[in-house]
Structure formats: structure tokens, C-alpha cells
Image (cartoon, grey):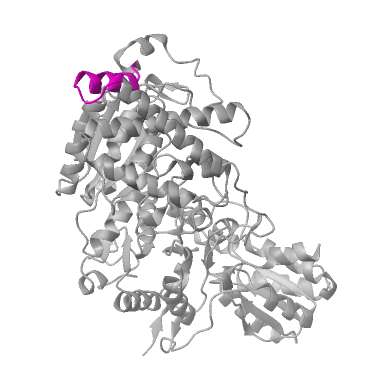
Amino acid sequence: MSVTYLEAIRSAQERALETDPRVFIYGQDVGVFGGAFKATKNLAAAFPGRVMDAPISEDAIVGMAIGAAIEGARPIVEMQFADFSTVGFNQIVNQAATLYFRTGVSCPMVVRLPSGGTVGGGPFHSQSLEAIYAHYPGLIVMTPATVEDAYSMLLEAVTLDDPVIFCEHKLLYYHLKADKLPDSAMPSGKARVARMGRDVTLVTYSAMLHEALQAADELIEEGWQIEVIDLRTVKPLDTDTILASVARTGRLLAVGEAWPWGGVTAEVVARVTSEGFGLLDAAPMRLNAKDTPIPYHPDLWATFRPTAETIAARLRQLLTQ
Amino acid sequence: MAAAIKDEAQESEKLAQSVPLPVRAYRVMLRARIIEEKLASLYRAGMIKGGVFLGKGQEALSTASTIFLRKGDIYGPCIRDQAGRLAFGDTMLDTLRTYFGSAQGPMRGRDGNIHRGRPKEGSYAMISHLGSMMAVVGGGLYARRLRGETGAVGVTSIGEGGTSTGAFHEGVNFLAVEKLPVVIVVANNQYAYSTPNSRQFACADLLDRAKGYGIAGHRTDGTDIMACLETLEHAVSAAREGGGPQMVLASLLRLVGHGEHDDASYVDANLRKANVGRDCMEVGAQEITEAGLATVADIEAWTAEAQAEVEAALSIAQREKGPDPNNEDWRAISTERLVDGCYDDEEEDA
């Protein structure tokens, strides 16, 4: 018996609906149909009136959730693809993210963003937008890379009094499996050392964790031990865990699937260089997608984003510096 | 002293319940006009930082929008709703505290002017992005319905310019699909900042949009308090009784600039002379005196009373300190353990 990343997300929502009457789910096709990816399969029938289809109106979907949160509800809204959340961007960054600071009233809501590239996804069904949401004060941004985190972090997100942008990676939905759902979990906001190593600190998150682990496997054959850190949440960013690792390894590579300008990897490098410059034996490096829209053709897409091969190549470069 | 003013306000509210509706409404309009005149002079004297945005000419419509609301209802006001806010329970003190950025005000100096509210009391604090409050007010009502609470109504207002936004369309369509008990008050004040209606929309009649959304539409004369009261009483009742969203379209003219920095020189002189250009305060005074509900002396006394109320609130708000930057918690989220602490460390290091 195994459970997929997607089933973990569905189960977390089911559990939240079961245990907290304030929780409801709202989004396009999330009702009887069960969602474009089936993340809400059978939930509408199990929880009548609490899993509701929305019109194609990302702005209104998020706005509605904000009003419901003000009145004490705990909405989970699904953007069908992270890419479409830009239509609801204003409500997220200007309304939800400012409410607590402006009025002292918190805004407990979860915005689920099916994120990241898949084969043939193309420019508008593949985006990774964690950095742009992390840029705005007032939001918590989660990027689970494992089945266990997908489950426990989503459950925790629903209990938080603040708006959470939950970036779940579509590439992991069906293929990433665990034996069972976790009974306990690390709290959000803490990074996890996914693999110990002495030679390089490789900081990453979401689906890139798996490419990074594969690259680390390749390098071990060449005698290098790579320490891999899974950020889990990109905001807050657990700088302490990163610095502690760099203190051991003296080298840093930050890897992300998102675009290179600014963003999570840039933030990691900025923090390590400004707070831990003396820990570094070599200039820190980063690896991101190319600075173009996300291409459709599988061959273009495979080259567009970092992979185990390109990560391994970048690691070799860093190790010979 | 703040408590004393609040008690006084509650006392006068109780008294007001026993007076005829048009008089009650007119007195709210008057209080709004008078505090806004004070805000304008404070602005000219350089005593308010940032902009001042007034509702002169829209007091009748704004008052009527909320005078039929009860405790437990939801109000999402727009820029020119000083009167509607006062009728919904906002105080002159909250108004002035927010303009002065007082740490005692509901926004504690973190936001100013018309961006104020007390969300937990049903008064939502608008953001500047027009149209975005439609869905938020609807979400509040949706949560109430989910909890099995019935009878609450929401009112949210906007100008004709705001109806051009995508957020307005998405929001109203959502309200309509969910058949939520909400009144959408559209003040067609002829200009969105400087943009005339001819550059704002191409439809012959904005009220046709109600038909497009499948909701009820009502038209009223925004310069006439009696007409506004009649229309809004009907619309609020219809929403409360399960009739779904009600759109009210009122014609009037903004009798000030977009903000006090704007001399509104672009306004067509013919509009000022037309019916929409009438000042609702003058029309209202005439109506209540002709109906025998008040005398000119009554109105003078109410004016003096409202002026005294403004001065009393001002004497408090003006003396209060602004927020202390060194004592702010500078947190944008409520979950303390999830604050990204990195930037604080940088400051300490420096």
C-alpha cells in the first residue's frame, strides 16, 4: 500500500474538512468533478455544501476567501494552475497579505497552486511562482518536496492564522510515493537536511529536490559528498540551517526550477554571502531555469530547466574552483 | 473622553430612532458634510499627510446605502462614503484618527484616510484597487451562510469608473451565481478622476449590466435623499428577504475634485447646472422643511451640533501621538514563529 503526493494533498484536505467545521474548499471544478487533478476527488459528496465549484474568476475566488476568512472561516482555494493565480494576484498580495498589518485582523486562508513544469505543459501551465509571492510581506510560502510534507504542511497551513501560498508540484503528483501518510511532522519554517555530505551544500526545494538527490548520487561515485537541503518553506527561509551546513562544507549551490532573475536561489546566495562570507571557500553558485517563457516541446523543456545532469555538472564546476 | 464621545453618540443614536427617517438621514448627511469641510481645511492648512478624498454631493446616496443596515450586517464602502460609514457606526473620532495616523485609531497609522475599517464589526477596510471589495463582501456573507446564519445583508459601493474593472465583473458575477444577500450601490458621478463617462463605458445604460448578471436593478436620483431612501429601503429588504443581489444605480455629480489636490476644472459646466449637479444637502433641507419635518432653525441647530462634534473629536485626535517606529512590532503576519527574521538580524548587525 502506498500513497502518492497527490493523494496526500487530497487526504490532508479531507482531514481538515473532517476535523474543522470552519474549513471549506472553493475553486474551479473542485466540486463533483473533483478538480482538474482530482485533488478534491469525492470530497464534495462527503462534505455537502463545503466543496464548491467557482466561476472562472481567480480574482473573485481569492476575494471571496478573504471575506470568508475575516468572518472566521478557513477557506482552501484551488487555483487550477499556479499560472492562473496571476489573475487573482491583486487580491492575494494587496488584500490578503496586507489585512493583518493594516487592521490587526488576520486572514487564515490557503491558496493551493499546482505548480511547476510537466512534459508538454508549455508557457501557461508550468510556472513556479513562489518567489513573486515570497516577495510580498504578509504571506507564508510553502513548497513541499515530499509526500509527507505535502500532507503535513497542508494540514498545518489550514491551522495557521495567516495566508499561505501552497506551491504543490504537479510533476510529483502521481509518481512520488510514500509507504504511508506521516503521523508526525517537522513544523513549517524549518529546512531539512535531506542528505548529509561534507563537500558542498546544495540548497533546493520542491521537485528540484529529487533532481538534486540524483545528482548527489552521481557525484558520490566521483568521491564527492553533497549535502542536500530541502527548504520546505521558502518564506520564511531557514537561513540558520543553510549557514550551519555551509559552515561544514564551505561551498554553496542553490538550485530552483523558477526563473533566474531574483528569486529564491538569489535570496539564498545573498543571505549566505552577507551573513556567512567567511564560511565560503569558493564563490557561491546558482542554477535556475532559463530566462525565457517555458517552452512546450519536451526536448526544449528538458534543457530549459535544471536536471540531475546539469546540477551534477554545476557541482563539478563548483568543486574544482 | 473618547468613551464619553462614544456614549454621547450612542445616546444620540437612541434618540434618533424616534425621529422620522428623512430627518435621521439628513442629520447623518450633515455630519458627513461638516466633517469633510473640516478635513478639507485641515488639508489646506497642511495638517494632513497624504491625500484627502471627499464625498461632497454623494452624501444622500451614501447615507441611504447603510441606514437600513443592522448590527451583524457587512459594509464594504468605497472612496466617497463618509456618510455611509457614519450611518453604519463609524465615528468622527475614527475618521480623524485615521487621517492623522493616530496610534489610537483603527488603522494605528499603518493605513490612512479612507482606508479604514473594523472588519470584525462588519466594516471592511477597502484597498485602493477598485472592484476588489465586491468578492470580499460576498465571501463574508458566504461564510455566514456556511455557518447557518441567515438575515445578514452586505452593502458595497463603487463608482461608475470602478465598474470597468475585471474585479467588479468577477465579483458581481460571483455574487449573482451564489445569490448572496448583497446590495451593490453604483454612484454614477459622471467622472472617474478626470475621465468622463464617454471614455468609461459604451453601453447606453449602466443598469443594463444588472440584467446581464441576472440580478435585480434599481435606479435612483442620487441628489434626492427621499428617492435614495425609498430605493435603498426596497433594495436592502429584497436582499434580506432572499431576493439575491440588488444593483442600485444612482446619478449624481461629484461636487469636489477626485481628492483635495484636484480642482476638478475638467467638469462640464452644463452638468453643474443640470439635475445631477444639484447639491443633495440643499435638496434635502428643502424637502424636510417643506414636509414640515424640520424648520430652518432646527437645521441651524443640527449644524452647530455637528460642528461641535467635529471640534470635540478633533481636540482628541490632534493631540494623540502617532505610532512609535521603535515600538512597532513590524510584523506582516500574526504567526510570530513564521516571521522571516533575517532582515531584523541585518539591522542589528548594522
Front one among B249 and B22? B22
Q: Main secondary structure of the magenta part?
A: helix
Q: Is residue A190 magenta?
A: no
**Which residue is at the front of the view, B153 or A276?**
B153
Q: Name the residue located 35 percent from the left edge and 31 percent from the top edge.
A: B29
Residue A205 place in picture, x, y as percent:
58, 72
Q: Position of residue A310 (x, y in %)?
A: 66, 69
Which image quarter: residue A259? Answer: bottom right
- When asked about the image quadrant of residue B31, the answer is top left
Q: Position of residue A141 (x, y in %)?
A: 53, 65
Q: Residue at 25% of width from left, 63% of height from top? A: B146
The percent position of residue B248, horizontal first and vertical second, equals 25, 34
Give the residues drawn in magenta, as a range.
Answer: B278-296
Q: Nearer the viewer, residue B11 or B170?
A: B11
The answer to whether residue B312 is visible is: yes
Q: Is residue B50 above or below residue A29?
A: above
Image point (31%, 35%), residue name: B63
